[in-house]
Image (tube, rainbow, N blue to C red):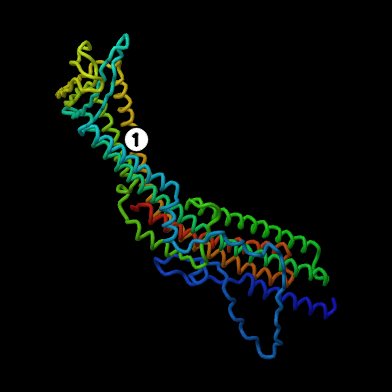
Amino acid sequence: MPRRRLRMVAVLTLASLALHQGVALAQPAPAPARPGQLPQGRPGQQAPAGAAAPPAAAAPAPAGTPAVTPQRIEVNDPALAPVPPAARTLASWNEARAIIEQRSVDLVVAVQEVARAEGSARRALAQALPNLDASGELSRLLAPGGADAPTRAGASITLRQPILAPRAWYGIGTADLAVEVAKLSLEDRRRFTLVAVADAVVSIVTTERLSEVNRVGLRSALELLELTRRRERLGTGTKLDVVRAEQDVALARATLVSGDESLRRAREALGAALGLKGEVGVPQDFSLNGIAAELGSQCTQTRTDQRADVRAARAELELAERGLTDAKLAFAPYAEVSSTLGAQTYFGGTAADGVGGLGDAGEVTRSGWSWSIRAVLTVPIWDGGARYGDLRINRAAVEQQRARLGAVERSAELESTQAVRSVEVAEQARGVAEQSRDLARETARLTQVAFEAGTVTSFDLVESSRRQRQAEIDLAVREFEVVKAKISALLASASCK
């Protein structure tokens, strides 16, 4: 090969090496986070391992060595453009919390369940309180032959008061307990909603970081493809090298498309969790540490057996037991006292009517009032067996709720244990991913050198580049899994009122 061509190939090779190792692929990991600090993936915050960083300054060349200024290979592709921003962006976690309280479907339903329970409690109380009714009546007797008939007007007011109503009295406590169960369910639903929104925010930050890494990978693949094509034109490469580079570009493009769709789905998931339509994004300076701090101020750490869902299940068991007692009270007698005060007035009519003396139509011929007091005792004897059916139903409900309580307690304990352990596991996985990323970088660098020396093929070069991209992606995912694990551990045994 002529020396001029060899020199040109060497210059292009040095440019490629400087490009891929110093510009596109060389992304040293940042300093490790301080204990208790959550890793961040946004500009202006602590970046996760694998985040792009300015290349380190090259060491000065030995004296007498001619300086070589590598030229960056320019590539243009529509896929390199970033994903358009979401239609709506959260300003802060406080804004997200306000939207949750107003728009979250699950939370709104739980709030209305509390209102329904309070309405039922008021109705149960009314069964034991006095009942006052008023009524009025206006009637005219129809006499045969067109004779004058009197018109009667009357009014009455009746007061009823239960004096022996054990079932109604017991129902007041049952209804109050149902209100407490609804409030505990609301508290637990709020915790779940906060977890869902926090996970959605972390997912958006993760997928946006992956989208950036995927674009860096696609750009590197396109630059490698362009370099390979130039080598083929110069006669130092083969068509097989170009095809392999094109396959690498296709793979990087497919990863990019999948990652962008994951970002859109994450934004839509956040919108759904907030009760909003369409995509909802987060700003570039959104602090994941701020989420943990806000959640820590909203929710207090408790023992697992004091978590809202466990207390709600325990209260539901008590509610089922009260239902069984209520079914037994259906056999108890019921007594009430009532008093009625009434008045009646007759207008018109004749003496033949037997209701008054002589008088013109429209004149009052008779009026009077009455007052009665009555006490009624009701003793249930036989209703076809309905009360015995209620007893069986409520006994079965008690056993069912007892089994559910055991399941909820075990689930809460397991969830809390796994959440705490997941933080340690996530941090260990992040450390392994960081080591793998560093090894993949070094492998890609050494493969590039070996390829220039002719000891490896283009297949090895493309494969090392692909593995490095995958290692960068894995590390970004592991970084945000640490964040998610810490948030989950914070809310696993928390009470959010």
Q: Is residue 232 something one can see in this rendering?
A: yes
Q: Residue at x 58, y 62 (%)?
A: 85
Quadrant of the image occupied by residue 236: bottom right
Tell me if 185 is positioned left or right of 478 in this view: left
* Identity of the residue drawn at 30% across and 48% down: 306
Nearer-the-camera pick, 454 or 297:
297
The x and y percentages for residue 302 are 30, 53
Residue 413: image location, x then y, percent: 35, 47
In terms of secondary structure, where does tag 1 sit?
A: helix
Q: Which residue is mark 1?
A: 403
Left or right relative to 206: residue 379: left
Against 433, residue 176 (above or below) is above
In the current view of this chain or complex, which residue is farthest to the top?
Answer: 145
Q: Residue at x 38, y 45 (%)?
A: 110
Tag 1: residue type? Ala
- Left or right of residue 194, residue 128 in this image: left
User: Can the viewer see residue 325 in this picture?
Assistant: no
20 and 197: which is toward the camera: 197
Against 16, residue 143 (above or below) is above
Vertical comparison of 391 with 431: above or below: above
Q: Quadrant of residue 375?
A: top left
Q: Quadrant of the N terminus?
A: bottom right
